[in-house]
Amino acid sequence: MPRERAWLVYDKWFKVYGDIVYFEVLGQGYLILGSSTRTSDLFEKRSGNYSDRVGMPMLIGLMGWDFNLVFMPYDPWWRRHRRTFHENFHAGMVHKYQPIQLRETHAFLRRLLVNPRNFMHHIRHAFAATIMDITYGIKVSGTDDPYISNAEEALQGISQAGIPGQFLVDLLPLLKYVPSWMPGANFKRKAAYWKKVNVDMLDKPFEHVKECIRQGTSSPSLVATYIEVSTVEGKYQAEEEAVIKGTAATAYAAGADTTVSAVQSFFLAMAMYPEIQRRGQAEIDSVVGPNRLPSFQDRQSLPYINAMVKETMRWQLVTPLGVGHMCSSDDEYDGYFIPKGTVVLGNIWSILHDPDMYPSPEEYMPERWLKDGQINPEVHDPTTAFGFGRRICPGRHLSDGSLYAMIALTLSVYNISPPMNDQGHPVHPQPEPTSGLLSYPVPFKCSIEPRSGAAEALINEEDSD
């Protein structure tokens, strides 16, 4: 079982064995699916049998991620969390958050102007600040804000432990009873640290909102609204609080991190493909003009920018292997017997890098999404990047809006290019992903400069808003 960049290993296996591969590790079966046909057949058409989650002793039992609906088993408790999350982040609701998204993107542009070298951190700061305001009404300001660092540490843990089988305790659950002081039990010490981080992420912002409500100083937010409405209706009990708290922390964790990777990949692509950057800027200039920044109202008039959003989601994936589903009952598919309890993974990387659907899949090519100057609906949509079936990410609509705002506003006022070496020659970065459940571009450098004096003035002008 591959442990580093497993999606690339599985992609090679598909080329040898076909698009459905099964293997066992210490008696645990793994089924890896390598095409949209296979994932549709199982995760969509047979979703009732392939929507459960496998038990992960490291992540759930030891690290305390049981509050997160992404990892909950497919049961009524998951449905309550999913329904609450969907009520606040479905396609018809996310427009309410656009002012916050634009405000934090404007702040991101100003931070770039002051310290462009720290763009990777600025990206994370922007998304953490956005989701903290939406979810808890907390305004994140300083670069070393504890809410940002807390989310970053929590997501580092989930990235390492989120793929089934990455820790031996997932395959031999009895190991969770081993004392942490024993040789070889370093995983217990890691889990204890990450559990404390996760408890802080779950409790601290939630308790902050409750205290502000008691003092009458709370800001508008999802958590404040739920607490106040539930209290008035007499529904606010321990169980209701657990649902609200878990849903909020799930949004906090996902919103603070997952789209971060996509925006970092966008900066990488702009440093690698200057002609694409110029084409995107030309479209913005023709539609928006030089006197203001793009808004969400401009989006329908910016097909090339929308193509860049789609290509950024497809090119370097945030969750290239997705989160493992579990087969709830014995099944037979295409002549194969699939035992109950099998971990079933859809290799999103293989699907969104299928050369039959996406010619030259390793290249960043927004043009692949266009036909006659508009988005081509015949091209397989990259929504696969958010998962499958009933377990598809319910925050995908918010993520899409945030990605659009970042790309459109950044291109409107900045040029992104490769850095220069000591001899004055450009050092061209190359895509290289990190391993784990969540994948990011390996840290890289680029040059970020305002496009003009007028662009710099526009960035600073937004400071007074």
Image (spheres, rainbow, N blue to C red):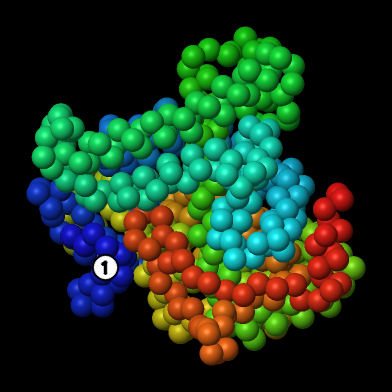
Q: Image quadrant of residue 12?
A: bottom left
Q: Nearer the viewer, residue 377 or 245?
A: 245
Decide if residue 302 is on the left or right side of residue 134: right
| Total numbered labels placed on residues in the image | 1
Residue 308 place in picture, x, y as percent: 62, 72
Residue 117 screen position, x and y as percent: 59, 66
Answer with the quarter of the image where residue 105 lies.
bottom right
Q: Is residue 296 visible?
A: yes
Instruction: Give coordinates of residue 3: x percent, y percent.
Output: 23, 59
- Vertical relation: 137 (above or below) 25: above
Q: Nearer the viewer, residue 457 or 390?
A: 457
Residue 383 at x, y percent in the picture: 52, 60
Residue at x 56%, y 53% (from the top left corner)? 124
Give the answer, above or below, for where 257 lies relative to 242. below
Residue under label 1: 10
Q: Residue furthest top?
A: 234
Determine whether the residue tagged by mark 1 lies in a helix, strand or loop.
helix
In the rendered view, does 352 fall on the left or right side of 217?
A: left
Mark 1 neighbour density, 10 Å: few (under 14) some (14–19) many (20 or more): many
Q: Quick one: 434 or 276, which is closer to the camera?
A: 434
Relative placement, left or right, of 372 versus 60 is right
In the foreground, 93 or 255 = 255
Visible in this render: residue 365?
Answer: no
Residue drawn at (56%, 22%) of the image: 207
For the point 26% across and 69% down, which residue is it?
A: 9
**Which quadrant of the rendered structure holds the N terminus?**
bottom left
In the image, residue 134 sits, relative to residue 120, either above or below, namely above
Query: Label 1 amino acid?
Result: Tyr
Specify the farthest residue to the front: 422
